[in-house]
Every structure is written in C-alpha cells, then in structure tokens.
Amino acid sequence: MSHAPVMPLEAPATLEWPENVKAEVAEAISRYPVERSAVLPLLWIAQRTWGWVPPAALRLVARSLELPEPEVFGIATFYTMFNLRPVGRHHLQVCMTLSCSLMGSDRLFRHLEQKLGVGHGQTTPDGRFTLRRVECLAACGGGPCMQVGLDYHENLDEAKVDALLEKLK
Amino acid sequence: MSHGPLLFKDIDAPGLTGIETYRKQGGYEALALVLGKKSPAECIDIVKASGLRGRGGAGFPAGLKWSFVPKDSPKPRYIVCNADESEPGTFKDRELMEKNPHLLIEGIILAGYAIGSKTGYIYLRGEFAYVQTIVDRAIAEARAAGLLGDDILGSGFGYQMHTHLGAGAYICGEETALLTSLEGYRGQPRLKPPFPAVEGLYACPTVVNNVETLMNVPHILKHGAQWYRQWGTEKSAGTKVLSVSGPVKRPGNYEIPLGLPLRTLIESPEYCGGMRDGLQVKAVIPGGSSVPMMPASQLDTPLDYESLNAVGTFLGSGGVIVIDDQTCVVDALWNMIRFYQHESCGKCTPCREGTYWMAEVLERIERGEGRETDIGLLEDVADNILGKSFCALGDAAAMPVQGAIKHFRDEFEYHVKHKRCLVNRRRQAVLEVTA
C-alpha cells in the first residue's frame, strides 16, 4: 500500500471502479447475505486503488451498495484507517500507547518529527512521508513499533528508524 | 521467545501456515473425529466439561455460551471470530493467526458444527491486513482440500468462512460493536439483552468467540475434557497465552498453565528473565490496559481468573504490561486514559465526556498544574463512568484510574504537592510529544 499511486487532492467529481477491480468488488459483496456489510471491504478497495479515499470514492461506494451518501461518509470518518486526505508514499504510524511508550516511542516520535520536519498528521513537502501517532497496534512485545503502510516494524530505535527511512524512497 | 505446552507447542514448525504441515501435526483430525460422529450436543458438553473460558477478556465459559443458541430457531446461525485484538498490551492472536491459521479455521468449523451454523466470519482489526492475507490463503487451501465447502469429509456437514477487515476502532473488539461493524455500520455497541447468541449478526443467533478460545477447541474435542484439564486449576482450566510487554528482558507471548505465579512469569529464565538492567517492577497490569494495576507487592499472585479477582483485578485478555520503578504512575495512567478518550465511540455520555475529563485532569497533574481536589475529582469521574456507561469501554477506562489511585495514592499526592513526578525516566519526551 505504501506504493499506491496517490491521486491529487483535486480529485474528479465522479469515479468508477477500474476494470481490474470490478471482480474484487463483486466478490466482496458476495461474501455477505446483506450487501451493506461490504462497506468496509469496498472502502479498503477504494483506498488501495486511489491511495486515499476521495469524496468521489465515498459516493462510488454508496452507489455500489445503494446506501445514502451521508451514511458512507459517517462510516468512513468513524474508522481511523481510511485516509480522507492524500497521504505520502510512506505512511509512518508510530504506536504511542503504554507498552510502546515504556520502551521509548515518545523519544522515537520526536526524533522522526525533527528528522522529517513535520508533525503529527503532516506530510513532507516531497510527498514521501506522512507521520502519524497511532494507538496500540497489537505489537506491544516489540515496542517501540511503527506500521509503515501495512508493514510492521518492531523493536525500533533511532538508528533502526534512520536505516529504514533510507530504504523508503 | 514465545513458547507453551499446547497452542504454542510446535508453532514455529517451518511451513505450518500451509495445510500439509498442519495435517502432519495432526491438524484437521478433530474434524474427522467429530463431524457426523459426535452430536452437536455432545460437542457442547465436552467443551463445557473442559472448563474452557473465553480468552478474549471476559472469561465467560465457552461451552455455556454455545448452549445459549436457541435449538429451534429457524434463522441461520453464525460463528464470528473476534480477531480484533485491540486491547493494549495484547498481541497473542496476531502471532497465533500468523503462524497457525489452520488451527483457527478448524476451531471455527467445529464451533459451527456444535451450534448448527453454516457460515463463519473472522473479524480482523484493520492493521492486520497482512494477517488477513495469511488466513485467506489458509481458507483457500482448506476449501481446495474439501475441509470447507458443501460437504466436509463426506459428513454431510457444510461450512463457509470469510475474513472481514476492520479499519481502526478499539470499540469493535466489544462483541456487539463488532457485529454492528460487520453489518456495515459505524462500530457502536448495542444493548444486551438480547445477547448475540439469540440475536447477533443480522439479528440471527451468533456466537462470538476470541481467536485463542477457538484454537483450543480442536484440541479439546480431539483429546477430551479431562486431558485439557491437565493444565490449570479446577476453576481456571487449561492454558492461557499471556502477552508480556514493558521493560522485561524477554517480552513476548508465553502460554502458561493457568495458576502460574506472576513472579515466575516475569522473573524466571524460562519466561521473561526478569527486568532490564537497573530497573525493578513497580506495578503490573495483568490483563490488558482495561484492568486495575497491581503493585509489586502482589507479584506472588497466581495467574488465574479467581486469584486475580481476589486481589481486585482481572486476567482479562492476558496482556501483561510491566511498569518499572523509574516510571511515573500518573504518567502511565494518563497514557492509558488518552487511549480511551481517543477510542470512546461517542455513543453514551459517561464514557464520551468522562474519558475526556479524566485525561484533562491527569494531564494537568502530570504537567505540575494539579490541584489538591484533583485526586478526588478523578475518583468521582471514574465512579460516574463505572457501571453507568453503555458498554464495557467506559468501565475499561474507569477501572485503571481506580486501581492506580488505590495502590499509588502517595504518588498522585506527591505530584499535586510538589508539581512534579516522584520519578519519571520518560517525562521530557512525553511532555514534548503531547504538547
């Protein structure tokens, strides 16, 4: 997901599912006896397809499931993992909850802020990184932990994070 | 480092995520022994007799939960596996699914057989997208091998299974919120009763079980209830996976026989091997961040449901967070309450407002701006959440506050009086990040 192409903020007013994901959309809907259960799966497909979930994709999901648009907006804003604004190519999500904090995640986050010159929720001007504080990732035994896109990186310290950032172009 | 006598016994065998290796370990043998050969009622009785209790946090007897599904309901029935694993301090289900997905699949099919269900869903937290890939691959393998589908092993019993990915919401670990989320709504809890066993997914009879609970089922149905009771105590039978985090030498998942003393888990070279150099245990949160912490003086408490209740806390999900003597209790508590403030779903006032205010008051104490009345204020707010919120999330936020003040009141008082921490190795970084 880190390398998903990112649609610019000026997204088109309408979107359609690209040909190559139509089967995936149909399969997701077929998993449930009630169509609206597929709302999260479809939002995920949208995020994978466009790198974030632009308003037109929310409307597309609503149309695909015959749901009122405001319902889908309400759902997408309830869950924290849908990016309703574009994110950088690499989405750095640092766990700040107690176990990771005890192992130094606060210092690590400060290090990232200083190194990247951005704060929580911000993206570097080159569009490479978005930095975010997140709550528990269920990697407490490997704290401090950071999820980059969908990948877990555990037992981090400043040196390991620096080495990791080098690899994330 | 993870190890244990049952679920973790051979979990690092190369290739175990594949069906062939799983079958070589005796996998899917329970299906062959049970489907069409034991009645669903017998299966429920065996699980009841094993003493297996829900491993997700509530500790409710699993067999009893299954028996609540109405026998005469004409509606479809569902097994929903709670793989949301969102309780801070808990990371066992992730490792279990990542390494042994077929055991979960077998457990769900067996649970489905016991309650007369034909479809199961595995609700994974959104961050576990890569785990979903592993489980989906295992489901496809099982389907190809005729272990899922219309007629499993010629028994006439059919079963379908799907994974479902959440998208970041702690509340979806609460079973009714999970079902609401799976139905395609904002993940907010609903009233109980009716309990899910009667009206769950799509208002149909549904059993929601945790990953670890379901993974015990094939072993129990294969080897019997008495065999499972070789581990644990009379009331807390079997094994439990404890996820240990914090500054111990070897954090990780340890599957223990229930009843093992907490001190052994933390200090023994067989488990965590003690604290990191220069640190001592100050407090331990034994069952995920929602349960009251215990002071180091209670380290000899056995890790089982009853013994932990006796000292005023809970085994919960088994997320053991070890807090060291160089850490400020007020700071640690503030961290946890920020979590609940962030995760409160907003449905009910005591939780939505209470978590906010507790976080505000804790922040001002931690920043050295606390007032003499603040400790009483915290207790009052916690008291107005506990038992008065719509679901257990509110209780989960209130109990840690009560536990911390009960055992470490002197630290709170010191903080208010001297406008600083008694001790805190992380203070500067925490205050900078939260500024």
Image: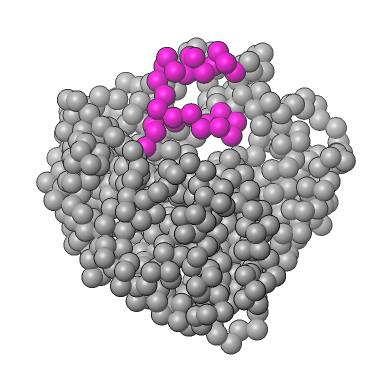
Residue B37 image point, x, y percent: 52, 80
User: B22 and A107: which one is in front?
Assistant: B22
Q: Give the vertical position of B182 relative to B133 (above or below).
A: below
In this picture, is B226 found above or below B260? below
| Residue B365 to residue B341: above or below | above
Give the image quarter of residue B127. top right
Q: Residue at x 66, y 53 (%)?
A: B140
Nearest the camera: A46 or B245?
A: B245
Instruction: Let me know if residue A110 appears in the view.
Output: no
Identify the image quadrant of residue B44.
bottom left
| Residue name at image x 22 percent, y 45 percent | B265
Q: Is A137 positioned to the left or the right of B188 in the image?
A: left
Q: Which residues are magenta?
A: A141-168
Taking depth in this image into account, of A86 and B242 the one nearest to the observer is B242
Is B211 in the magenta?
Answer: no
Q: Residue furthest front?
A: B24
